[in-house]
Image (cartoon, rainbow, N blue to C red):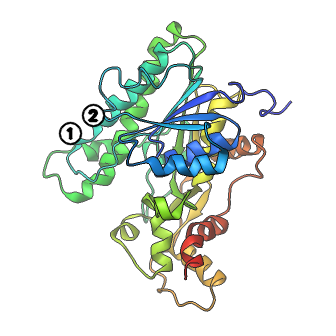
Amino acid sequence: MSVLDSPAIPKAATVLVTGAAGWVGSNVADQFLAYGYKVRGTTRDATKAAWIVEVFDKKYGKGQFELHSVSDMVAEGAYDDVIKGVSAVVHTASLMSADPNPHNVIPMVVDSAVNALKAAYAEPSVDRFIYTSSSSAAVRAQRGEPGINVTVDSWADDDVKRAWAEPPYLPERARFIYAASKYEAEKVIWKYHQENRENRPGLIVNAVLPNVNYGKPLDFEKQGYPSTSALPVGLYNGDISPYHQIIAPQYYVNASDTGRLHVAAAIHPDVKDERIFAFAGRFSWDAILEILRKNFPNKEFIDNFSGGEDLNEILPRSRAEQLLRDLGRPGWVSLEETVLENVKDIVDRE
């Protein structure tokens, strides 16, 4: 019997997705809706994010998605109302800040994650809690460094030390702070769950660790190119941003696959207290440029400027790919298909 025939949470149940208007959160919500679940989303300001309600109403019909404001993720009782009656909680919301001061970022990310987990523990209807961690909690791609075998027990300890080093807090520290925020939040979640699971023996906790997310925006007119989805578009337009210079060759994942792996973490009966590594395959900026040249031969592109590949071997990625197959997918969405999806809206408007 397939996973879809006997899911861990019943079809048409309601799933709470925090940060549902964000790049990852919107794809997570989209995939739960695509698999027949209702989604209750949260965002800091539901009025400003009303566009996503229109998108999902049009795509899935009214009543399948609702959006609520949670203006302060760390406030006591912030999720008390929105969590009532849901079968699963997916905490994608985070503080996406370039602040180079760790004290202004890391504690808030940790506290918001624990706040969401405590709310899940307190709500009897919740059977699964999924935390959206990051590849950077486990490993960092480094140019010119030998690779390592990354396992489910890998943690990027050195980046946490870099994040909390003594001042000065220079701008380049922001990437280490982001990594440390995900690392520390995930660590605290596992610790809390280990110490309190006897109080809720049926509650399963899983984490999804995506690497760089590319893919098609849900609605180009309303969403634009959020977060990392803007980077392939920049290359298509001939623009090299500071992020292109900072991000070393590493692994990509299609944002839809990231969403699907969150679905697997919530509904797959055999996925229990796991870290799921959303690492589809390797990429570099030069590899993306080659895809663009191949598919748009009449357009001139900038010269290659960043090649090579991530030498780390991500051993748990095969488990993640099997979970995609269990959901009826052929496996990972390829880099070429992902890049072409990513730039389709801008190409169509030329």
The percent coordinates of residue 267 (x first, y second) are: 68, 30
Specify the label residue 107 is tagged with: 2
The residue labelled by disc 1 is 103
Q: Amino acid at mark 2?
A: Pro
Along the viewing direction, whichever of 143 and 64 lies nearer the viewer: 64
Quadrant in which the C terminus is drawn: bottom right
Q: Secondary structure at mark 1?
A: helix
Residue 315 versus residue 85 in the image, above or below: below
Q: Are marks 1 and 2 in contact (CB under 8 Å)?
A: yes
226 displayed left or right of 350:
left
Q: Residues within 10 Å of mark 2 (few under 14, many from 20)?
A: some
Question: Where on the picture, by quarter, is residue 339?
Answer: bottom right
Residue 310 seen in the current view: no
298 displayed left or right of 223:
right
Along the viewing direction, whichever of 51 and 301 lies nearer the viewer: 51
Mark 1 → mark 2, Cα distance in angstroms? 7 Å
Question: Where on the picture, by quarter, is residue 74?
Answer: top left
Along the viewing direction, whichever of 275 and 56 lies nearer the viewer: 56
Report the residue at 31% width, 21% height from top: 76
295 displayed left or right of 106:
right
Q: Residues within 10 Å of mark 1 (few under 14, many from 20)?
A: few
Residue 56 versus residue 145 in the image, above or below: above
Residue 327 versus residue 282 in the image, above or below: above
The percent coordinates of residue 182 (x first, y second) are: 39, 40
Q: Which residue lies most toward the top here?
A: 199
